[in-house]
Image (cartoon, grey):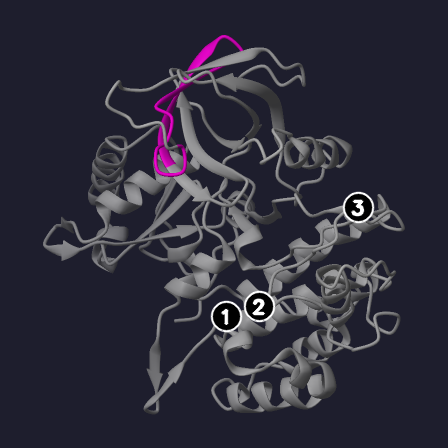
Amino acid sequence: MAHCGHSEPSAKLQAPDSVPPDRSTTRPVLFEIFGEIWTVQSRLGQGVSASVYRVSSGRAATAAVKEFQADSQGGDYGFHKERSVLEDIQGHKNIVTLYGVFSNHNCEGVSTYCLLLELLDVSVSDLLVRRSTDLQGGRPQQGHSMWLVQHCARDILEALSFLHREGYVHADLKPRNILWSADDECFKLIDFGLSFKQGNQDVKYIQTDGYRAPEAELQNSLAQAGVEGDSGCTAAVDLWSLGVVLLEMFSGIKLKDTVGLEELKENSAAIVDHIFSNNNLLCPAIPVYHLRDLIKSMLLHDPKQRCTAHTALLSPFFSIPFAPHVKDLVLLPSPVLRLLNLIDDSHLHNDEEYDDILEDMKEECQKYGSVVSLLIPKENPGKGQVFVEYANSSDSKEAQRLLTGRTFDGKFVVATFYPLSAYKRGYLYQTVQ
């Protein structure tokens, strides 16, 4: 990876002559970062004050660049704000990594500031949009598995517990700001542009509509009216937001489209009970009441009564050993692929055939990236499945894309990802179908 310090050498932006100067509709082609050329592959997101790009270097390294636009007064408050927070909280596995900062000068002479960040994968927002629909007894099952909800809840609570111990409030927790890391196999928190130190709130407007705590709603209303006032926004606003996110992940319902803030504020317990009673019919064997109670403790109207991130992690919900659903392993990338529908039992008990299949599979899988190891269990669990460990998640994602639907010995290949940590331990899940 490029130099990871926090000095600010200049960077050069190169773009075709035909590109118009309107930076809201165009994107850079190349960044020179710390003396190295990085190619812009795509725009990952664009907001009012910044755009985020996927970039790669000549050494095949990938990262994300968040480029801030100068504000109307020519200032760079947003950049310095997010930079200072990220530099202060680096080192936690569930918070996006900041590699460095740099300034950029384009061909029109406009100077911008940029953050070089860890490149992450799908967001919880993506997962909610892409969720599959199964028909069970004629009813669609919405939302995600308990394994995925538990995984996300634990990871983000770990991030919040650390953040709050450091004295910070994230203040914009929502599905788009929770991203999956394929290489670290966990969810991470991003976007600290609205974050503030507890007791020193320097941002008037906080949180996003639909994930905004009642006290933050009051804070924003006072700010809009030009009234100075202390609404008492604390770390508890983050717990409210996470409660809404988890409720959406479990139910598949976008809460703000069905429930108004005032209604949720006054009747949160009844609303949560209603959502869980409807969804519990689809999976009565799963003790979902632990998740229900955890979410209810996050959605209490009085912020002083809400659970903290630390106490939430003590919930019995996190002691339940859920297994991933097949859909989870399709949606969440990892460096390990699991190939299904390939090998008959008869091939497993003939040593010569088995060795030939191992060689054939390794040769085929190496076409898509560097293979670290390959396993085909002869007994359950995992009997007849092919597990391929790639050197990185980029290779495994490309292999999954290209292998899915291919035929092998007359059979259609089904390719899912598989948790690297479980594979390394030799733990082969009997996944929920």
Percent of width and height locating residue 186 = 58, 48
For the residue labelled by badge 3, is the local secondary structure a helix, a strand or a loop?
loop
| Residue designated by label 2 | 322
Q: In this view, does 90 lie above or below 347?
A: above
Residue 133 located within the stretch drawn in magenta = no
Residue 29 located within the stretch drawn in magenta = yes
Mark 1 vs 3, N-terminal side: 1
- Tell me which residue sits at (77%, 64%) in the image: 222
- Tell me which residue sits at (44%, 60%) in the image: 127
| Residue designated by label 1 | 145
User: What residue span does the magenta drawing correspond to?
Assistant: 23-42
Mark 2 vs 3, N-terminal side: 3
Q: What quarter of the picture does the C terminus occupy?
A: bottom left
- Given residues 269 and 59, the one toward you in this image is 269
- Given residues 169 and 18, the one toward you in this image is 18
| Residue designated by label 3 | 202
Residue situated furthest top in the rendering: 35
